[in-house]
Amino acid sequence: MSENVELSPVDLDILRLLQNDARITNKDLAAAVGIAPSTCLDRVARLRDTGVITGQHASVDAAKLGRPLEAFLFVQVRPHRRPLVDPFIEHLLSLPEVRAVYHLTGPDDFLAHVATSSAGELQRLVLDELTARDEVARVHTNLVFQHWSGGPLLPPGT
């Protein structure tokens, strides 16, 4: 497990601002947190080097990309052993419909967030790509009506 990284109030402000807008310029970021641009650049580099910042991404609207139907697929794999689990994860991540995969505790082993073009495509995905696999014991599907994102992730108590 990773160690916590000691973060100053300025580091926390930088993280909050970058999570709200990863495209903010270094100059604007530095001004917003009240430090010199060179210092800000060093702090952001440290946050990357220590693994606090793990990347940047663009949020996209799946519906505008022709995938308006989103769902969560709860998958039970049997037997739940590494020789089957690792290839199964690789398989899921290779599918263009899969947006995220989570390994779980409880009755289900995996949760896959998927986006498809239609109910028929979702059915094809479940039947041809999941339940057709020998290690998949069960798939439970929940459709997403709407979703909201939370605010910036910061350490507890900040």
Image (cartoon, helix red, strand yellow):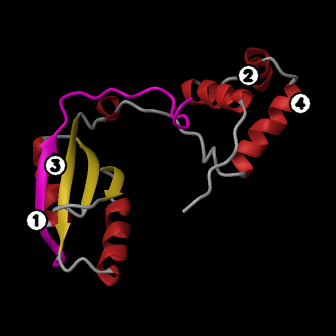
Q: Amino acid at mark 2?
A: Leu
| Between 84 and 68, the one nearer to me in the picture | 84
| Whole-percent x, y for residue 16 in the image | 60, 27
Residue position marked by numbered label 3 in the rendering:
121
| Whole-percent x, y for residue 82 in the image | 34, 80
Q: Is residue 48 above or below residue 65?
A: below
Q: Is residue 22 above or below residue 52?
A: above
Magenta part of the chain = 134-158
Query: Which dot, 3 or 1, sits closer to the camera?
Result: 1
Packing grade of label 4 (10 A; few <14, some 14-19, many >=20) is few
Residue 67 in view of the camera:
yes
Packing grade of label 1 (10 A; few <14, some 14-19, many >=20) is some
User: Which quadrant does the N terminus fall into?
Assistant: bottom right
Q: Gap between marks 4 and 2, in whole Å?
A: 11 Å
Residue position marked by numbered label 4 in the rendering:
38
| Whole-percent x, y for residue 29 in the image | 73, 22
Quadrant of the image occupied by residue 126:
bottom left
- Residue in the picture at 29% in, 35% down: 66
| Whole-percent x, y for residue 91 in the image | 33, 68
Residue position marked by numbered label 1 in the rendering:
138
